[in-house]
Amino acid sequence: MAARPDSKHARIKDARHESTLFRRRAIAGFLLIVACLSLLGARFFYLQVSRHEEFSSRSDSNRISIRRIVPSRGLIYDRNGVLLADNTAAFRLEVVPEQVGRMDAMLEALGAVVPLSEDDVQHFNALRRTKRPFDSVPLRLKLSEDEIARFSVERWRFPGVDVVPYLTRSYPLGEEFAHVVGYVGRIDINEAARLDADLYAGTTHIGKTGIERSYEAQLHGKPGYEQVEVNADKRVQHSIKREAPTPGNNLYLAIDSRLQKVAETAFAGRAGAAVAIDPRNGEVLAMVSIPTYDPNLFVNGINQIDYSTLLNAEDRPLLNRALAGGYLPGSTVKPYVALAGLELGIRKPEDTVLSTGEFYIPGDSKRAYRDDQRWGHGRVDLRQAIAQSVNTYFYGMALEMGIDRFSSSLGKFGFGKPTGIDLIGESSGVLPSREWKRGRFNQAWYPGETVIAGIGQGAWVITPIQLGQAVSIIAARGVRYPPHLLRAVQEGINTDPQPAPLAAPAPSIIHNAANWTAVEQGMIGVVNTPSGTAHGMGDGFPYVIAGKTGTAERFSRTDEEWTSIGSSPIQRHQVLFECFTPADDARIAVAVALEAGRNAAPIARAILDAWARYDDAPREVTLK
Amino acid sequence: MIEAAALERVFFDMRHRVQRALQRPALDLPLLGALLLLAITGLATLYSASNLDRHMVILQGLRFALGGVLMLLIARVPPTVLRNWTPWLYVASLLLLVVVAALGQGRGAHRWLDLKIMRFQPSELVKLTLPMMAAWYLHARELPPRWTALATLALLIGAPALLISREPDLGTALLVAASGVFAVFLAGLSWWRIGIALAGLGAVAPLAWPFMHEYQRNRMLMFLNPEADPLGNGWHIIQSEIAVGSGGWLGKGWHHGTQSQLEFLPEHTTDFIFAVFSEEWGLIGVLLLLALYIFIVGRGLWIASNARDTYSRLLAGSISMAFFVYVMVNGGMITGLLPVVGVPLPLISYGGTSAVSLLAGFGVLMSIHSHRRLLPR
C-alpha cells in the first residue's frame, strides 16, 4: 500500500541536478543563518557593550536598596539617674503599599487576623500618602504575642505586610511625670509634612508634649543607613555597607523623682499644681500637676474612648496646671508689692499703717476695701503686714505706687509673661496694667483696680511656675535664674553627661539689701510668728522657712455658681502657698496652688521635708 | 510487502546490529562533540540559574541521557526505513494533535496528552514528522517544486501548524511550520516564488490579529513598547535586557548574575535562561555560544549535502535549519529583538520534551550521516 514515489517519477528526476540545487540552497540557507545570528550578535553587542553602563546601573538599582536605620531615642533620667522614659522592644505590622494589590481588600482580610482599629486604618491611610510607594508604613503597633503568632500563620496571604521589631517608648513612672516628660505619639500627617524626610525616614514616633517635645531634636538622634541587596520581592538578601545610626542624646532632668513622688502624693488627688525650684540656678526640682494621666496610653495610639474621657473630664487631667493653669494669686503677691514699694521709696520697712478693717480711696467714701479681720490688725509695719497679710497696708502702698509703677515693678518678678521654662504650652498669665486693660477691654484704668491689684485680686492671673519663679527671685535676693528642667545632656553612652549651658543671670533687681531683709523677715514671720498666717507650718523643720499664703475666691460672690456650691469653703476657695528655705541661704523655693482646699502649706511642707531628707548638702542646724 | 520484508530483515538482524553499534557507533563525531559541549554548557548554566539546585540539574541530565539513547537508537534506523514510515507517522501525529485539541489537558494551554505513565506532547512529535512528510512529498517530485506542489505542501504544513497554534503554542507552531518551509526552500523553490509567498504572507499576517489570544496581543504590544508597562507586561523584556546589558564584555561570572539570582528575571531556568548566560558570561560567552550553534547548524547542513537521496538531504537540512530557529527566536526574545514567544534555547533551557525531541532529530541526522554511502540492505 505504501507509495513508492521514487519509482513513479524516477524517470524525470535528475539526481545530480537536485543534489547541486540542494548544495546551493544549503549554502544560501547557511549564509542566511549566519546573517541572522550575526544580527543577533550585533544586538547583544548593542546591549552588552554600547548600553552596558545604563543596564549596569539599572541592574544595581534593582538589587541595591538603601534602608534607613532608625536611631534609638535618647533616654530621659531624673537628676539622680532614675529612668523616666525608656525604650522597650515591641513588634508592629508594616506594609509596603507598592506590594499590595488591593489595599482595602487586604486591610479587611488582615483585620480578621489581627484586630485593626478604625484609628489604625485612618492613620495608616493618611500616612502612606506622604510616603513613597516602596516605603514601609506602620499599620498596627505593639502587637501581642498572640497576634504575632496568628499573623505568622497567615502571612503568605499578605504580600507586602511584615512584622517588624521596633523600640517603643515606655514611661516607668507613668502618671507622676506625665506633665514633665510628656509622651511620644505616632507622627501625624501634619508633622510628616514638616519633618525632614531623611532625618525621620523610618521613624514613627515624635515627641508630642513635655520634654519629649521640647527636646525632640536632642532625643531623636541621626538615622544610619544600610545598603542591602534585595531580591525582586524586595526581601533583603544581605548587607553591603552599613553606617550605624547615632542614637539620640540622653537627658538628665533637674527633677528629683523622690520630691516629685512626695509632691504628687501630698495632693491626695486634689486638683492643683506645685513647683519646686533651686533658686541658686533655676533648676526645677519638682513639678506636679494634679490630676494627671498615664502617658503610656498615648504611645501606641490611644483609643478613642480613653482619649475622649481624658479630654472631656471636668478636672482636665491633660492640662498642665503648673504651666498653663491660671490662678488668682491673692496675698501671695504681697511680698513682691512690698519689695516694689520699698524699692520705690514709698515706705520704709519700719513705717506703720493703721489697719481698721476698712480702706477707702481718698475722696471716695462709697466703696470700702476690707481686711480679712473685720476689726483690722491695728498698727502694723511691713514685717507684720506680710506676716499677718494685712490688706490695708498693701491697698495704700499700691495706690501710692500707681498702676504704671506697680506693673513695671511687679513685672520684674516675671509676672505677666512666660518664664521661658523648657516646655511648650506655657501661659503668660495677666499682670494688671493700663495697657493690658486697654488691649483686652479697651477701657480706662480705675484707681480701685490698683487697690485690689495690691492684694493680688482683680485682673491678676498667674501660673504656679510664675509664682515659683517669683519666690525664687526673692529667695536669690533679686537674681533671676530662669527655671529649667534640663540639667545635663549625655551624648553617647561612653561620655559623661555634660551640664546644660546656663544663661548668665541678670543683676539683682533689688538695689537695697535692707529692703530684701525686711521682706524676708516678713515672710519668716508668716511661718514662724504666732500671728503668722502659716503659723506652725515650719515646726520641726531643720531650717528656717520663709513663706507666704494666698487665698482667692474662685467665684465672685454674686455668681450663681458660688451660691450653688453653697457653704463649703473648700469648694469656694483656691489656696496658694509660696516659700523658700533655708531663709538666709535659700536652696529650695516652692510654690503650691490648690484649687479647692483650705491650706496649701502642708503640701509645700511635705516637699520641703522630702527635700531636707534627701538633700546632699551638709545639714545646718538652725535654732529658732 | 517489500517493507514487511525489510522490517523482518531489520528484526532478524537485531543482535548483529546491536553488536555492531557497540563496536562502531554510527555517529558523526564532530556533531556529537558539539552537542556534548552544548549539553555540558546547558547543565552548568542551569546549575547557576536554578541557584545551585542539584536536583534540577540531575533531572535535566537524565533527560539528556534519555534523548541521547533515543538519538543512538534512531541513528541505527536507515533513512529508507524512515522514509517508508513517513506518511504513517505524519498521519498518526496529526491524529494525536486532533485528539489533544479535542480532550487534551494542560496548564491553561491544551498541549499535553496524559498517558497516565507519562505526559506526552504530540506537537514535539510533529517537529520531526512534518519535515519528514515535506521531504517525503518533495522526494517524489520534480524539483524545484511548482505551484501545485506548493499548494499541497501548504496544506501539509498548515494543518498541524494551525492545530498547534490553537493549543495555543505559538512557539512550537512557528518551529513546526519553519521546518516544513525550510524543506521547501532547500528543495530549490525559485527565488521569485519565495518572494511572492513572503509578500503574500506579509499581507495576510495582520489578519491574524483578531484570532490571537489576549496575552499574545499583549506580548506583541509589549515588544513594540516595553516601557509602557514596566511592572506588568513589559517586566519580562525589561528585566531580561537589563540582565543581558549588565553582563558587558566578560559577564558577572558564573553564579554571580544578580538579575537571575535575585529573581528579577522571570522564567530564568526555562525561556529566559539565555539572559542568565549572557549576564554571567558576557558578550564573549554569547559569541562563543552562537558560534557553537552555527557550527552545529553548519555541520547539519554539511551532512545534508552529503546525503545519498533527496529525502535525506531535505530532512537533514530542514532539521538543521529549524534548530537555528530555536536559537534565533529565543535570542531575539531575550534581547528584545523579537516578541516574547515561548521557544526554549536548545539544550540549555530546562525542560524535557524539547531536549528529547531535539536529540531525536539529531538521531535522524546521525542516521543520514552514517548511511550516506552504505546500502542498508
Image (cartoon, coloured by chain):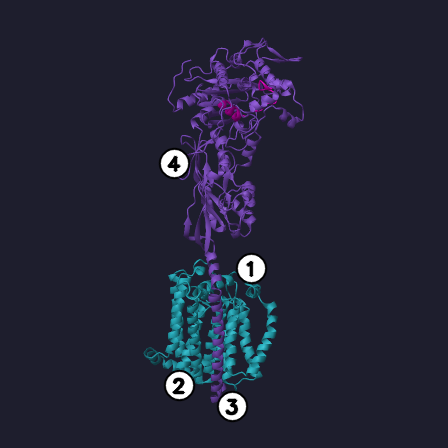
Query: On residue A12, which mark appears?
Result: 3
Of A160 and A530, the residue lying toward us: A530
User: Does mark 2 fall on the same chain as mark 3?
Assistant: no
Which residue is pictured at 52% across the width and 60% down the height?
A: B235
Mark 2 falls on what kind of element? loop
Real-space Cα separation, disc 1 to disc 4, in angstroms = 57 Å
Tell me which amino acid carries mark 1. Asp
Tell me which amino acid carries mark 4. Asp
Tell me which amino acid carries mark 2. Arg
Query: Disc 4 designates what residue?
Result: A496
Residue B364 rendering spot, x and y as whole percentages: 43, 78
Query: Disc 1 designates what residue?
Result: B229
Of B127 and A54, the residue lying toward us: A54
Query: Disc 2 designates what residue?
Result: B373
Q: Nearer the viewer, mark 1 or mark 4?
A: 4
Neighbor class of circle 2 (other Cα within 10 Å; few <14, some 14-19, many 20+) is few
Chain on which label 4 sits = A
- Point out the tag, 3 or 4, that comes first from the N-terminus: 3
User: Which chain is depicted cyan?
Assistant: B
Real-space Cα separation, disc 3 to disc 1, in angstroms = 59 Å
Q: Is residue A555 above or below residue B212?
A: above
Which residue is pictured at 40% across the width and 14% down the height?
A: A623
Query: On residue A278, which mark appears?
Result: none
What shade has chain A been given?
purple
Kindly check if marks 2 and 1 are in contact, taking CB atoms under 8 A apart as contact.
no
Mark 3 falls on what kind of element? loop
Span highlighted in magenta in the image: A453-473
Q: Nearer the viewer, mark 3 or mark 4?
A: 4
- Point out the tag, 2 or 1, that comes first from the N-terminus: 1
Mark 1 falls on what kind of element? loop
Real-space Cα separation, disc 3 to disc 4, in angstroms = 109 Å
